[in-house]
Image (cartoon, rainbow, N blue to C red):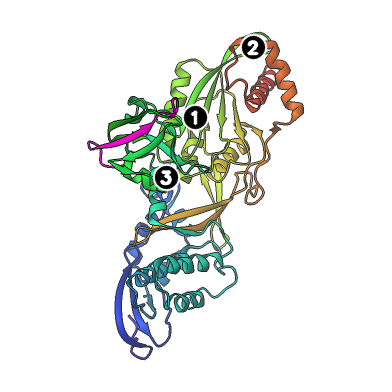
Amino acid sequence: MKNLSQNFDVRAKIPLKLGKPTWEVLFPRRLWFPTWTCEEKKLKAKCCGREDWIESAGKSAFGFGVSAALFCSVFSYSPAALAESLTVAFPVSRAPEVNAVQRTLVEAWGLIRETFVDPTFNHQDWDLKLQQTMVEMFPLNSADAAYTKIRGMLSTLGDPFTRIISPKEYQGFRIGSDGNLQGVGLFINVEPRTGHLIVLSCIDGSPAARAGIHQGDELIEINGERLDGIDSETAAQRLRGNAGTTVTVKVKDSGTGSYIREVKLPRELIKLSPISSAIIPHRSPDGHLTKTGYVKLSAFSQTAAEDMRNAIQELENQGVHSYILDLRNNPGGLVKAGLDVAQMWLDGDETLVNTIDRDGNMLPINMVNGHAITHDPLVVIVNEGSASASEILAGALHDNGRAILVGHKTFGKGKIQSVTELHDGSALFVTVAKYLSPALHDIDQVGITPDVQCTTEMLNSAKEISSSTKDKASVSSLEADSCIMVAEHALDMEESKGTAS
């Protein structure tokens, strides 16, 4: 540790922890910015703690041979530099709320300093930016105002995906990514015109569904407390609780609009599956009746890969001949989940994605002796709502010749974020790497253009074929989906090419 006596008038000392390292926070005459304390032997553990997909990589090497160099170089750690120490000093606010946010500010600043993909920090002095933000935060009296200063500091990086979210928002994010919650199985939202809390849907088999609560019903009370003026997240938190406990709700029936009943609901462990699947009967142009397995993947949660594997196995057992994988409006999620799903459709040592770290080094992520669950023809449907991990998956399957892409151009998010929970329960998202598709196509702000677009011409062609091969009375909502029609047509075209060869 350096001798700080010449640089600091020590009036307060607050230890801050960022993973293992301890931050020493002192009242300064001026700011001092040496390097972050970290022993080299702890480096791997720190890299692995940043984000779920990286944590899993440290334990299982993604399941397909990623070396430790990937997740450490992605964050651009230098063991020599980390062996030194970092002391951050700043004037401690007299307002306890603001003082707590000052600690959060230092944590966020330090994580970005060590991991942000742009080492120039959008061509600014990042150390000076901390000093400026501390000066602006010092006279404030509320935590909300102090958090606004952190968000302002992050906005100067020019990256909308590097951001901080509140503890409440992070809890919702964790539920979405973990794929599980303890509660009653209700999705609720505030109706904008009335301000009433309305049931959007019930999870099949959940306590709410078993109690006969339906979409459109209005929540009036939770445990005897009126919900007037309560937002949906606050109400959802009241509904959640440890499995085995109960919660009592008053519900106004959507059918009658006046009937109110009180229901006591047990809380249970609810599994939120991002997968839905079905079989679409399909008659090929030559008259053969076939089965197409349809799988909709809505998000890349921690359970996505396992749920996808189960869905494919079940469809295989039912004798499907081809597949449609629907990634429309899938905003992404955990990168590892996307890579795990890609492996279910590919063989060999294919490249799944190429990452580019903050130093510009490109690191391919490859499979190792992969074995696909099925080799049946595959079409992937995408649109402008398909982003991030969806684009990684679509690019991996397309560039390796495994799938035809149908739909509309994707969103274009070619960046990977780490997610770190901070000491106060908030969370920091930091862009730590860029990525290119296996064929080295840049996706960021560009997107992926599908092989076959759902244009009017293609839709008319697909509808003509559909009308001649389907019984109109038996057409399901899936079969009536225009892009699914185009996908089925693409599968027919692919099969005819295979037959001709």
Query: Where is mark 2, residue-wise?
Result: 472
Circle 1 residues within 10 Å: few <14, some 14–19, many ≥20: few
- Picture layout, residue 381 above or below residue 135: above
x, y percent for residue 181: 34, 40
Of the numbered discs 3 and 1, the one sitting upstream in the chain is: 3
Which quadrant: the C terminus? Answer: top right
Q: CA distance from mark 3 to mark 1?
A: 42 Å
Of the numbered discs 3 and 2, the one sitting upstream in the chain is: 3
Amino acid identity at mark 2: Lys
Where are the magenta residues, as a range? 241-257
Query: Where is mark 3, residue-wise?
Result: 232
Query: Where is mark 1, residue-wise?
Result: 372
Residue at the extreme front = 258
Which quadrant: the N terminus? Answer: bottom left
x, y percent for residue 28: 38, 85
Residue 494 highlighted magenta (yes or no): no
Judge by depth and name the residue closer to the eye, 3 or 231.
Answer: 231
* 386 sits left or right of 26 in the view: right
Label 1 SS: loop
Quadrant hosting residue 71 = bottom left
Residue 249 highlighted magenta (yes or no): yes
Label 3 SS: helix
